[in-house]
Image: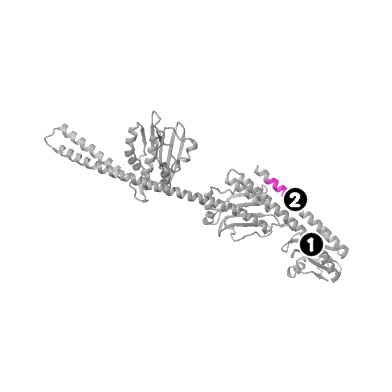
Amino acid sequence: MTDVSVEATETDVQSELPLPHLLDTALHQLLTDLQALVPYDLAAAWLGHDDRPALRVTVPDGAELPSNSATRHWVFQSGAQSARIADLFVDEGVNPQGVRSWLGVPLVLNGRRRGWVELLSAQPSLFSDADLWRVEVVVRHAATALAHMEAAAHTRGELRTYRNLAGGLQRGFLASTLPEALAHILAGAATSTRAVAAALLLPTELAYALGLPQVASDPPSPTSEEQAALVTQVAQWERDGEARTWPALNRHDRERLAPAVGNGEAVLPFVHDGEALGWLWLHLPPVEPLGLVEPDSLQHITALLTAVLVWLREQVLREQQAQQSVRMLVQHAHQQRSSAITDLMAGLAHELNNPLSALLGVATLLGRDPTLGEDARADAQLIVDQTNRITEFVKRLANFGQMAGSTKVPVKLTEIVADTLAVVGGLAQQRSVALRVIMPDESPVVLGNRAQLQQVCLDLLSNAIEALETNDAPEVTLEVRIDGQWALLVVSDNGYGIPDDLRDRIWTPGFTTKTAGGTRRGLGIGLPMALDIVRHHWGTIGVSSQVWQGSCFTVRLPLI
């Protein structure tokens, strides 16, 4: 539907502007009228913009003018006044027609010189001052008529601008995706200027925040990495299917506020509060005598697209602020939770260490008693071994969760898993959950904070175990492996799974599906906290899940 609408707009533009034909007819009529007042052998009318002729009409049609016309046109460039030359130099190489007399009058529209009319004759001194005056009067009236035609053309251009901009904006608001919306808005802006091609470029940082990729089919190679990092082409439009050279990133002129009139490229910057939000690149059509792209139309386009980009940037800023608030909330909850866990573990370890130390001392003394038999001495040694095992577990329990700020050191991922299994192994055994652990022969090493990575592993394992309450044969698989330049920690279960409509919400702080007796349990900060920790370790965390088949969480951390 988008293409049909754009094509219809272009057809309307072409059908409503038969301007070149009207101008050709009017200038021919002007020269014919002058023939009745001032006889001449050859005449020409030139019409353009800022002294650049875009339309030339001659009487007789197709007549060849002397090649020294540049000399005659200099009269208008220097003085912009009517003039006559009584006798031109005749030379077969420069003036093969043998033109001797010349008379010229400028075409002035609304106070601006927009062209000229010249009469030529083979007779020397043919044109008089009276002839010059009569031609001036006729040309002045003709210029008034042409000025009205120009005003009408500009009015139609303004209406076309409003219509195309409004149409592009409407289609953009109805689009289902942001890239499609920007493509519609760009098409409306391009057809407003009758450009043959256009491209919308944004600062790469803004384009990345909006999720907009580079769309150029054959993007140009920038001259420096810095320029490539600054600008991204996010939308492009062309009137026909011809291959075009799209704007090079190193050619953008961010200072220009309006394009030069005529052929070639033009860049419109969208500036708000001194900050460039984007650029519109236009490939303009050839110069037309009237009905040109006026600055007012370009200002409308600039104002509209600037407003759109300001709105988009505000949405990005709001999203970033919301993410920052969530991040601060998660970090605060993480600190509180870690502090509570640390205090609990430290207190528990302190209470256990005293009786364990006494038990270890008594068992050691008993083992050294020479009066004991071999069986009693073996039992004493067994007590010592098991007490040492419990003491080591308590030591791990005391160290688990102790935060060391954000300091990151090389750590072995298998050691992180082993420490976590020592903590949650009892929970799995209590709930009859089979723990299946797959470790590589050589542990992958990552740069990280040991306590924080333990927290991630603990959250994933605890969630997996708690998701198996309704399973008759509960099993959790924990695997550590290497994938290219990444270390992978994979935790999977055969529980109920996560429904599709909840899969994205599990990362939202405060969201939880854990209930006990109809009462909500859990703070809903475990997974958001794990996500934040993994991101601060330059990694990613993802989930795949199917209902009644279980879930699989994969943590990817860069190897060192």
Which residue appears at 32% of the width and 35% of the height? 426
Percent of width and height locating residue 357: 21, 42
Given residues 352 and 284, the one toward you in this image is 352
Query: In the image shown, does 346 or 230 lie closer to the viewer?
Result: 346
Residue at the spot x=57%, y=46% of the render? Answer: 178
Q: Amino acid type of disc 1?
A: Thr
Q: Please, is residue 370 above or below residue 33 in the view? A: above
Q: 336 above or below 85?
A: above
Is residue 184 found left or right of 376 in the rendered image?
right
Q: In this rendering, would 339 be left or right of 313?
A: left
Residue ID at (78%, 57%): 23
Q: How is the image coloured?
A: one colour
Q: Secondary structure at mark 1?
A: helix
Q: Which residues are magenta?
A: 6-17
Which label number is shown at residue 144? 1
Extreme-top residue of the structure? 472
Q: Main secondary structure of the magenta part?
A: helix
Rendering quarter of residue 459: top left
For mark 2, give the secondary structure: loop
Q: Position of residue 506 (x, y in %)?
A: 45, 40
List the residue tagged with mark 2.
16
Measured as percent of width and height from the top left, residue 261 is found at 68, 59
